[in-house]
Image: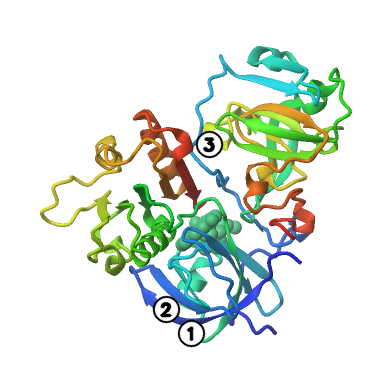
């Protein structure tokens, strides 16, 4: 038997950036999930051909509703269909929740650092939203690396008044006018400020493209962070 | 006709005889790891086989490199659904490490630098089915892909091919490893789509 495929209907699609979309789906009898988990999404063509890719859940459990955040990849088989092809009201199949390691639990009360590169912000946003909903006492710090101001997802979720959430956006190519930090990739200085507020055993969650995750991990370990505190999710 | 994903065309319908169910072919080499890439210098690397009675057999890097080497080409299948065809490796078959080891064990737990573990039946490691590899596509295996050396068990999902391998413990009982304890299937045959618990 295993984890079953279930139908999921697209309820709503919203733009996050020019090429990234939020997809809200309803999956009857969804069993719930933890922030950080993902689903497999399966598409079926008229001749029966199927393609499957993994997508992180962008919101904490909410009955039958699940939310994905998908970046259209140039020439990609699945992601452009999800961002622009799948009609509202139509169905795909999903399987999950999957991944029991890259998860944040509301019981966690120690400070945690979240580090996102590009679409890697999706599962970390589920953690941010769950943190707020649980009124968790442990502060969260989110470092979010994007190319330019137009590439920032989830402005509404990241900018509200949760006193225990600290969000820092780092622009790699072009920063908004008046920014103190010059555009560039994440540096030791960016991480030092954030890790100074952690305890030695506090968890660090790093998510994004493999190159980004490798670079961040290396900076953290160079600064003496214990590798066992670092959890990673690589998007390819 | 299907009731799902109207208008979806898809791309690859080739090579289906080589593609296990639910997989797609890729030219790139994605990375699945639970945590950071450990740093493992070959000067201090060693590979240790520990029997169920606690006897140990160890090889340094130079000793491992002095064993007979094989070139071997395989299709590999990651549980995150990519498959990569004709990957080329160089390394030492597990048989070479195990031939002088006295054991009545049925299972092995593979352990890695960085703390990762994975379990499999011992017979899946023998008879030319598994290798310790150090070279990929003609170049030293890069750290994010498991360098300096990883296990290669191409007939199982690729999480069984432990990166940064450092040892093998032989056991009478099957002991679930890292991903096997976190929801992944205990055996992981891609042709039977054994991805998660209960599959
Ligand atoms: C655990 C996990 C969670 C993830 N979560 C998210 C998420 O929340 N949001 C998100 O956007 N992504 C996420 N991803 C990534 C996602 O699963 C897909 O990899 C991504 O959407 C690309 O899929 P695709 O089918 O569009 O592209 P693919 O078809 O897989 O192609 C990827 C790239 O390879 C090139 N390519 C592939 N095949 C060919 C070919 N035959 N010829 C030429 N070029 C080719 C494409 O041009 C493209 O650049 C996640 C991945 C994992 C493993």
Residue B48 at x, y percent in the picture: 70, 21
Residue A42 at x, y percent in the picture: 62, 70
Tag 1 and tag 2, C-beta contact below 8 Å: yes
Residue B144 is tagged as 3
Which residue carries the number 2 mark? Answer: A13
Neighbour tally class for label 2: few under 14, some 14-19, many 20 plus, Cα within 10 Å: many
What is the C-alpha distance between the residues marked 3 and 2?
36 Å
- Same subunit, labels 3 and 2: the answer reads no
Residue A33 at x, y percent in the picture: 53, 65
Q: Residue at x 69, y 62 (%)?
A: B22
Q: Is mark 2 within 8 Å of ligand 1?
A: no
Q: To which chain does the residue with label 1 belong?
A: A
Question: Is residue A169 rendered to the left or right of residue A14?
Answer: left
Q: For numbered disc 3, what is the local secondary structure?
A: helix
Q: For numbered disc 1, what is the local secondary structure?
A: loop
Which residue is situated farthest in the left direction here?
A178
Residue A88 is tagged as 1
The image quadrant that residue A48 belongs to is bottom right
Residue A162 appears in view: yes
Residue B33 at x, y percent in the picture: 55, 43
Q: Residue at x 76, y 21 (%)?
A: B54
Mark positioned earlier in the residue sequence (1 or 2): 2
């Amino acid at each position: 038997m295993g984890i079953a495929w279930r139908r999921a209907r697209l309820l709503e699609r919203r733009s996050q950036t020019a090429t990234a979309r939020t997809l809200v789906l309803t999956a009857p009898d969804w069993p719930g999930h933890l922030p950080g988990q993902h689903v497999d999404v399966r598409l079926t063509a008229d001749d029966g051909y199927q393609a499957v890719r993994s997508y992180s859940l962008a919101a904490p459990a909410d009955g039958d509703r699940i939310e994905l955040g998908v970046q259209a990849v140039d020439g990609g088989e699945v992601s452009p269909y999800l961002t622009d092809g799948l009609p509202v009201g139509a169905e795909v199949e999903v399987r999950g929740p999957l991944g029991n390691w890259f998860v944040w639990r509301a019981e966690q009360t120690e400070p945690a650092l979240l580090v996102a590169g590009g679409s890697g912000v999706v599962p970390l946003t589920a953690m941010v939203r769950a943190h707020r909903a649980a009124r968790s006492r442990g502060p969260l710090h989110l470092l979010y690396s994007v190319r330019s101001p137009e590439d920032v997802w989830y402005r509404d979720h990241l900018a509200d008044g949760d006193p225990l959430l600290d969000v820092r956006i780092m622009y790699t190519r072009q920063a908004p006018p008046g920014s103190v930090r010059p555009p560039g990739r994440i540096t030791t200085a960016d991480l030092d400020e954030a890790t100074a507020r952690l305890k030695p055993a506090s968890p660090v969650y790093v998510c994004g493209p493999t190159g980004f995750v490798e670079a961040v991990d290396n900076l953290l370990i160079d600064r003496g962070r214990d590798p066992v505190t670092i959890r990673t999710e690589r998007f390819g | 006709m299907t009731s799902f994903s109207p208008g979806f065309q898809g791309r690859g319908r080739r090579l289906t005889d080589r593609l296990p169910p639910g997989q797609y072919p890729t030219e790139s080499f994605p990375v699945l790891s639970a945590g950071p890439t450990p740093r493992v210098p070959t000067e201090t690397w060693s590979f240790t086989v520990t029997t169920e009675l606690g006897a140990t057999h160890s090889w340094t890097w130079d000793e491992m490199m002095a064993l007979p080497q094989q070139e071997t080409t395989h299709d590999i299948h990651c549980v995150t659904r990519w498959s990569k065809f004709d990957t080329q490796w160089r390394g030492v078959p597990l048989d070479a490490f195990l031939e002088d080891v006295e054991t009545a064990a049925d299972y092995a737990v593979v352990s890695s630098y960085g703390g990762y573990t994975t379990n499999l039946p011992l017979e899946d490691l023998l008879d030319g089915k598994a290798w310790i590899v150090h070279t990929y596509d003609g170049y030293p295996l890069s750290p994010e892909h498991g360098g300096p050396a990883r296990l290669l068990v191409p007939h199982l999902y690729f999480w069984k091919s432990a990166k940064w391998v450092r040892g093998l413990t032989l056991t009478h009982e099957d002991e679930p490893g890292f991903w096997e304890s976190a929801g992944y299937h205990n055996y992981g045959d891609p042709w039977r789509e054994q991805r998660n618990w209960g599959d």
